[in-house]
Image (tube, coloured by chain):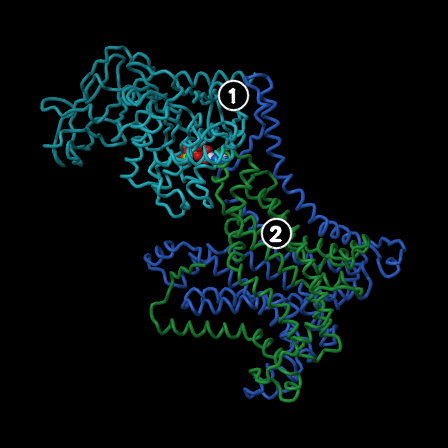
Amino acid sequence: MASVTYDAASRIYTPGARPAINQLQLDIADGEFLVLVGPSGCGKSTALRMLAGLEEVNEGRILIGGEDVSHVSPKDRDIAMVFQNYALYPHMSVAENMGFALKIAGVSKDERAKRVKDAAKLLDLEPYLDRKPKALSGGQRQRVAMGRAIVRSPKVFLMDEPLSNLDAKLRVQTRTQIAALTRKLAVTTVYVTHDQVEAMTMGDRVCVLKDGVLQQVDSPRNLYDTPANVFVAGFIGSPAMNLFQVEHDGEALILGGERYVIPDGSLKKTSSNKVTLGVRPEDIHIDPEHGIEMVVDLTEELGADAHIFGSPEGLESFQPLVVRVDGRRPPLKGDHVKVVPQMDHIHLFDAETGLRLNGEIPENTPHAQLADVEALQDEEGE
Amino acid sequence: MTSTTPLRPRRTASRQALNITALAVALLWIFPIYWMVNVSLQPNAQMRLEGPTWVPLDFTPDAYLGVLSDSSFWTAMRMSMQVSLLAVAVALFSATLAAVALSRFRFRSRTAIIITVLVVQMIPAEALFISQFRMLSGWGLVNTTLGLSLLYVGTVMPFIVWMLKGFVDGVPVDLEEAAMIDGCTKVGAFFRVTFPLLGPGLVATGVFGFLVSWNEFTLALVMLSSGGRVTLPVWLQGFQEGMSGTDWAGIMAGSALIAIPVLILFSIVQRRMASGMVSGAVKG
Amino acid sequence: MATLTPTTSPPGTVPRDSSPGRGDVSRRARRRQAFLPFLLLALPTGLVMLALGYPMARQLVMSFQEFGIAQQFGQPAEWVGFANYQAILTDTYFWVVTVRTLAFTAVAAGLTMVVGVGLAVLMQRVATGVRVALQLALLFAWATPVIAAVAIWKLMADHRHGVVNAVLSGAGLTGFDGFHWLQAGTTPFLIVAATVVIWASTPLVTLATYAALSQVDESAVEAAQIDGASTPRILWHIVLPIIRPVLILMAILQVIWDLRVFAQIYSLQQTAGNTTDTNLLGTYIYQTGIAGGDYGMASALAMVMLLLLLALTWRYVRILGRQGDLR
Ligand SMILES: Nc1ncnc2c1ncn2[C@@H]1O[C@H](COP(=O)(O)OP(=O)(O)OP(=O)(O)O)[C@@H](O)[C@H]1O
Ligand SMILES: [Mg+2]
């Protein structure tokens, strides 16, 4: 058990090109479950593989339990990893697969058998111990991969999209099991996924990456409530947050001809005469009296509630506006409605930099990060 | 090979015609081998007097007994065995190293080396045997197992590297990575995980190299020229040229005795051999 | 695609801290990583250099020398510049042999490819039993040692006892009764030689192409069928591009093997007697060098043959080589 630290760690595949991981600065506490999330190709796997020792750390360092392991080979890092396609050894039985690491470590045969058995019991794998991976279902293989990781009681678990090969139902079920299991074992876990539901439900904290740059790392709640920039705002949440370009006069937003005063002065922080306004679908309500006029283009009924889509008048947006409404009597296609954002739940972002303007600005975000990078680059230049 | 027959014609009549064509081709292709066996089991006089007989009615194993009691056949057999085994052992071991380097690492001159492998594959023995002969004679290795084996190693290496690379590519890198995380060194991961999975491919490749050496004629003819021990193909050629030039049954029996072990080995591993070459080409 | 990145410093040597030594370790590890593949390549490369590279260099040198019988008995070889090449290129017999070799290669390699690929496509569409029979027949032909194959065909084409003449004259072509294929001139001789070559080399083409065909993704073919493409068009536009690397490899190999063909011609010549009318480049080099003792000239001839091979196949070798990096 150990903490993990990425200390300005970078991975540069091709010198001169954009780094796959750019100055990643991240502290993961002992026993914490941290989820790495981001769109495809953002460098999640790379970050994980750097920690595993499968990718070189070109700049900066990686520490496990306070020790610099940047140039330690994977076998000496005391980590376990669950691969996306499980990477089970096809020529070994389930028991041999799970006991392989212990065998390499020179653990005695009896001890090995005992620990494999315990892990198998934990994962309901006992009936399959003598089978080859080929003779297992996808879900069973996934559990063997998990088993291979937990028999070792390593310092850190690494998991790279371990659920992406399972069907939807099994995924939900296994998601809960993994979260419960790792908390029970209290082992530090770094978990990669591109599925934001997985990220939000499993992580103690979630780290959002984009193009190899850390965007925000925070608890799921904070990530949802105070996204640090437009990217995180749009990425987290489903349906996605509504984002518009809105004019302002320094004190108030001008929306559909009406002025909405922002009292905390956040509009003074930007030099542009526009800001990006973000409102989550559930933070907009339909008002009979006044608000922004909208014709409903589509209604998605989900049972408990419904999502209505439409293009409001006088608002610049590339996406249709989404509003979450009561599922019992939703407006239907073609209805005219007036919608009002709940002003205490809006998000304001700088129209140019995309950074958050209002509310509590989260720490450990590109605000700090970008400045760091620049400083470092200056240093190198000298 | 599991056949995926996506373009299966629908009408059974045309299907039948295809079946018959294929059978006819199969018969045409197997016929020379049938003929070899047929003639080897007939008395020579029979053919000389009456021309070819389609079935060996006057069955006699004399020709085989003649060859098997010939000590020069056994000498050649031993020579062929030694040369082929030595060449394959050395070539297989070193080709494995090369295949791993080309399959598991990305380095600057990799493409150049892959092209070189292909080009070296092209260099025909027939274009080099003059100076290869001079080289061996300079080292006193003409007429020796070692000398001929060395040349065979050079001949089969590129092809073996090519095939093995295909097989190594076929083993997911993930497995080696998992083994490294499980505590193996890089070399350990290769030997504990990739190597066992490579087994069938190694066997197929090894058999291929063995057969190429076993069947090789040109280099053996040149390097084992001045009397002394020869390999089986050279022995068979000499057998034809010698007094037994019209002993057709004997020649066919000799051919059959050389070919049969090869046919058996071949049938066992051909599937993997063909797919090894293919995956080498398809996957690069 | 990700590759293994060996960070192989043993744990003891790793600085515990961000000390100044850190960069050193990193650089050393990186250097070792860059070095390892070359270490692995050393033995195989060394062996090939020894068996092929070194003789090749010597041959190149020898092709610029007067290197005959006298030199074999110790006289120093004399530099003659391009004299050997000049002699070759101005010799009409060389051109006769070269053109003959090229014609032989074109016919033999061409037919091998056409028949081989045709059989592979055929094989995909026949009943399993028939396919296995055909595979087995091809396999046997492939595995038969060259010299044994030549002996068999020699017997089958024998003018008196041969089954070929018996069948032909039986079919009414009485002109073939007692026809001596191997002594009746260049063309009949080469027809026999080409038959042996094609018989023995078609199986590899068929089996490899068949293996490649069965790797073609069925859904791509089905998609094309749904798009309304006819079978020939599917073969041409969908299947062919996918198996192209295999076809290129096979074609290169056929050209190489047929251009340098030696054993078959040599063995047939021993029966035919006449070599002048039947020589291809391979046997011509052998006669000039090993039999005639003129190593200098033979080396130059061999170099010319090598250049010819390279000229014919270089483009396709490059295509294949580049393919290797697209993975
Ligand atoms: N070996 C490599 N050489 C060069 N670039 C690479 C290499 N491996 C990955 N990359 C690049 O690094 C970036 C990050 O890749 P990575 O595999 O970490 O993405 P990811 O976030 O895991 O994506 P996904 O969700 O699709 O798995 C990508 O742009 C990828 O193209
Ligand atoms: Mg990934």
Q: In the figure, the green chain has which letter?
A: B
Q: Is residue C110 left or right of residue A25?
A: right
Position of residue B53 measured from the top left corner of the image (x, y, whole percent): 58, 84
Q: Which residue is at the front of the view, C301 or A34?
A: A34
Position of residue B149 measured from the top left corner of the image (x, y, whole percent): 71, 55
| Residue situated furthest top in the rendering | A264
Position of residue C182 measured from the top left corner of the image (x, y, whole percent): 68, 78
Q: Which residue is at the front of the view, C280 or B61?
A: B61
Q: Which residue is mark 1?
A: A68
Image quadrant assignment for residue C124: bottom left
Q: Which residue is mark 2?
A: B118
Image quadrant assignment for residue A245: top left
Identity of the amino acid at label 2?
Leu
Q: Give the colour in which the image draws chain A.
A: cyan
Q: Is residue B74 above or below residue B275?
A: below
Q: Is residue C287 above or below residue A80?
A: below
Instruction: Check the residue under mark 1 and report the chain it is in.
Output: A
Confirm whether residue B97 shows in the render: yes
Q: Give the colour in which the image draws chain C.
A: blue
Q: Is residue B7 left or right of residue B234?
A: left
Q: Is residue A278 left or right of residue C260?
A: left
Q: Residue at x 39, y 25 (%)?
A: A187
Dot 2: within a 10 Å radius of its alpha carbon, few (fewer than 14), some, or many (20 or more) residues? many
Q: Which residue is at the front of the view, B245 or C294?
A: B245
Front tag of 1 and 2: 1
